[in-house]
Amino acid sequence: MSLILFAILFAGVLQGIILVVLLFRKTDNRLSNRILGWLVSVLVVHLSLVAIDVRDLFLVFPHLSRLSWLIPHCYGPLLLLLTQSIVIRGFRLQWVHLTYFLPMLVYLTLLSPYYLSGTEEKLAYLSDPVGVNRADFGIYNHLTNYFHIGFTSAALIIFYRNRKALPDFFSDPGPARLAWLKTFLWVIWSIMVFSWICFISRRYNWPWLSSLYPNNFLLAVFVVYWLSYKLLLNPYRWDQTVVPPKDEPVPAPPTLMVQEESAPVKYQKTAIPVSEIAAIKVRLLQWMVEAKPYLNPALTIDDLSAQLNVRRHHLSQVINQEFSRNFFEFVNGYRIDAFKQMALKPENSHLSIMGLAFDCGFNSKATFNQVFKKQEGITPSAFLKQARGVKTEGI
């Protein structure tokens, strides 16, 4: 059984190395990809140490022993930073984020006497299986489980708190919600809880459950393969640059002049003059018709504000105040109108509903159906049947 477990762990290590190379080679979302790359790198090293332990090779490489006590303390901080870098707009690494690694620093300090000890001392320790087992399931690794669960829980809280604001930034928050990240966080949380159960079962010799350790590390191999799958099949960028519609000239928007007037009370912090709102509104409507930025499925409010030479919070105020919509509803309203125009053309009758929806800027079936039904009151297929039926009767 140990040989099979070793082979599976080794396969996970190889797949993890490939995933790390892919992540560090990606040029988009550099910060998030690098954090994820370091997270997978830590997992690869940890799995390698577990594989060595499974084959009782620490006697051959004694200086690698107990590194598995320290390295896992990178999981929580990196997972928290990964979540923040994806769901928090404009996130940047700061010195304060080093505090996330304080538990690791404490463990390094406490374990440094062992790490600095000589080969003979380590071999003497490793030659006592009972003592090694007692130490492995001692207070150090017991507390580590609680750090894991705490950091992962914090990442989930940050994810759900910031996800609510996505419609104000993304025109298609279907991918922007990053369902993979939610699944990933919950999977990691579940693995951490399960690993904690396996750990205490082994520590207190609970029947049956104690035999699961270290087979619970197979779940980490599953995570590596699942991440590779999502990366290769769904390489969505959550902070894309603007790609103008093909074969359509994009006029250069003029820089709007700021007038000296006060803003409504609700938007006092934005300091946008009231007279400027009308000018931004006119330019926005003109731009939506001429440049058709909504055809870019990854359009964000940062993209649109850059095209209009308007501050993002000013543009957000205009959309919220003048159209009583958030950015998501505003842009997708144009996409729905474009879909209806294209779908009702006889020459497009052979095209599928989703094919037309994608041509109009939608990036997911779920978002398209949700927006269409909310705006029109019926499903896209029912709308087309009704519209085409009326046309047929008229003919």
Image (cartoon, helix red, strand yellow):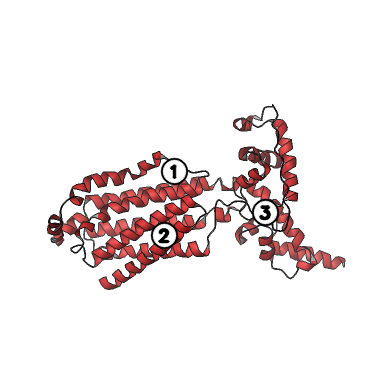
First-in-chain label (3 vs 2): 2
Image quarter of the C terminus: bottom right
Distance between mark 1 and mark 2 Cα atoms = 20 Å
Q: Nearer the viewer, residue 24 or 164?
A: 24
Image quarter of the N terminus: bottom left
**Mark identifier at residue 20:** 2
Please state which amino acid type lies under the numbered disc 3. Answer: Pro
> Label 3 belongs to which residue?
244
Distance between mark 1 and mark 3 Cα atoms = 31 Å
Please state which amino acid type lies under the numbered disc 2. Answer: Val
Disc 3 secondary structure class: loop
> Label 1 belongs to which residue?
93
Q: Residue at x 28, y 61 (%)?
A: 49
Pointer 1 with pointer 2, Cβ within 8 A: no
What crowding class fits label 3: few (fewer than 14 Cα within 10 Å), some (14-19), or many (20 or more)? some
Q: Give x and y (percent) for residue 334.
A: 71, 52
The reply, left or right, for residue 222 in relation to residue 134 is: right
First-in-chain label (1 vs 2): 2
Q: Give x and y (percent) for residue 352.
A: 69, 68
**Mark identifier at residue 55:** none
First-in-chain label (1 vs 3): 1
Q: Nearer the viewer, residue 317 or 110?
A: 110
Please state which amino acid type lies under the numbered disc 1. Answer: Leu
Q: Residue at x 65, y 55 (%)?
A: 296
Residue 1, visible in the rendered structure: no
Q: Nearer the viewer, residue 147 or 379?
A: 147
Pointer 3 with pointer 2, Cβ within 8 A: no
Q: Residue at x 17, y 58 (%)?
A: 132
Q: Give x and y (percent) for residue 146.
A: 31, 49
What crowding class fits label 1: few (fewer than 14 Cα within 10 Å), some (14-19), or many (20 or more)? few
